């Protein structure tokens, strides 16, 4: 974006880890505690500085989430992170910080504002050379907006929408883990450890398990990494 778009980009970070020099875009970086006491105050002030893009390091509280929604509804591209395990939990986390009386209105606003919810899990590689990211992508479509607004029910979940939405650029964790296992990048047991539904993944990979005895013994699974983050991008 910095190289291709003539945008004003404002970031609010805790802490600033990388300094971004102006290229085609103009970037102003703010650090929590050094430049501002809270994310919410910095975000409120950012709206008066005419940015096109706002990056919020983390949406930690109700006030920050509320202002981020307001910013997205007034034409700003807002990007932020939440500590959740997948797209469905991300929506639950955002809605859940508000009182019950406000939750339906927040669902409606979020369904209209969000563009993508991107989650990742870092899986140990089978060859022991570091980790590889399994990425889940939820895109704003008529179907996913309805599920966010009205809530998920049996047969009408965001996971179902992601499974059916591959042609629209969506993907879900277990499908990506299945692909990594079949490609020999991740060990089967390790993949099960990091999957959303280990039982379903095992059934989906029944053909792989039948052929597995013919292959070389797999390496031992690594311990589960509790650090999983989710990114959410919202725009009007």
Image: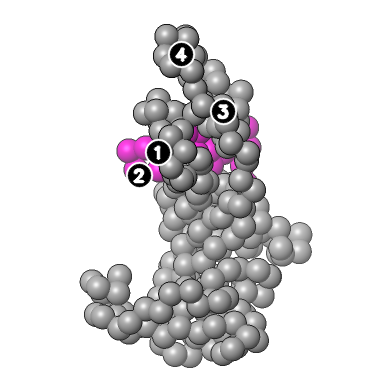
Mark toward the viewer: 4 or 2: 4
Asked if disc 1 and disc 2 are in contact, CB closer than 8 Å, the reply is: yes
Secondary structure category for the residue under label 3: loop
User: Of callouts 1 and 4, which one flags the residue occurring earlier in the amino acid sequence?
Assistant: 1
Of badges 2 and 3, the one in the foreground is: 3
Measured from the top left, where is residue 219 in percent x and y? 51, 27
| Count of marks, rendered view | 4
- Would you say residue 67 is visible in this rendering? no
On the picture, is 126 further left or further right than 193? left
Q: Which residue is mark 2?
A: 169
**Few, some or many C-alpha atoms within 10 Å of disc 1 (few <14, some 14-19, many ≥20)?**
some
Please give the range of residues in magenta: 150-177
Frontmost of labels 1 and 4 is 4
Q: CA distance from mark 3 to mark 1?
A: 33 Å
Does residue 209 appear in this view?
yes
Query: Callout 2: 10 Å neighbours few (<14), some, many (20+)?
Result: few
Which one is closest to the eye, mark 3 or mark 1?
Answer: 3
Q: Residue at x 44, y 28 (%)?
A: 181
Residue 153 forms part of the magenta stretch: yes
Q: Quadrant of the N terminus?
A: bottom left
Residue 72 versus residue 41: which sits nearer the camera? 41
**First in sequence: mark 4 or mark 2?**
2
Please report the residue visible at 51 percent of the width from the left and 66 percent of the height from the top. Answer: 80
Cα separation between marks 1 and 2: 7 Å
């Amino acid at each position: 974006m910095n190289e291709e778009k003539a945008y004003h980009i404002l970031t609010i970070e805790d802490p600033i880890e990388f300094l971004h020099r102006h290229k085609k875009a103009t970037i102003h970086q703010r650090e929590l505690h050094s430049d501002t006491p809270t994310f919410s105050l910095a975000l409120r002030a950012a709206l008066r500085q005419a940015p096109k893009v706002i990056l919020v390091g983390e949406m930690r509280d109700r006030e920050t989430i509320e202002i981020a929604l307001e910013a997205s509804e007034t034409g700003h591209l807002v990007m932020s992170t939440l500590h959740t395990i997948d797209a469905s939990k991300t929506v639950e986390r955002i809605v859940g910080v508000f009182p019950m009386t406000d939750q339906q209105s927040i669902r409606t606003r979020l369904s209209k504002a969000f563009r993508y919810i991107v989650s990742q899990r870092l899986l140990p590689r089978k060859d022991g050379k570091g980790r590889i990211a399994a990425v889940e992508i939820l895109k704003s479509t008529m179907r996913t907006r309805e599920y966010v607004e009205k809530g998920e029910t049996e047969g009408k979940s965001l996971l179902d929408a992601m499974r059916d939405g591959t042609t629209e650029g969506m993907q879900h964790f277990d499908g990506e883990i299945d692909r990594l296992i079949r490609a020999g990048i991740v060990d089967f047991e390790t993949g099960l450890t990091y999957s959303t539904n280990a039982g379903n993944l095992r059934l989906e990979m029944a053909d792989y398990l039948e052929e597995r005895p013919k292959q070389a013994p797999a390496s031992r699974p690594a311990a589960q990494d509790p650090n999983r983050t989710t990114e959410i991008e919202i725009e009007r």
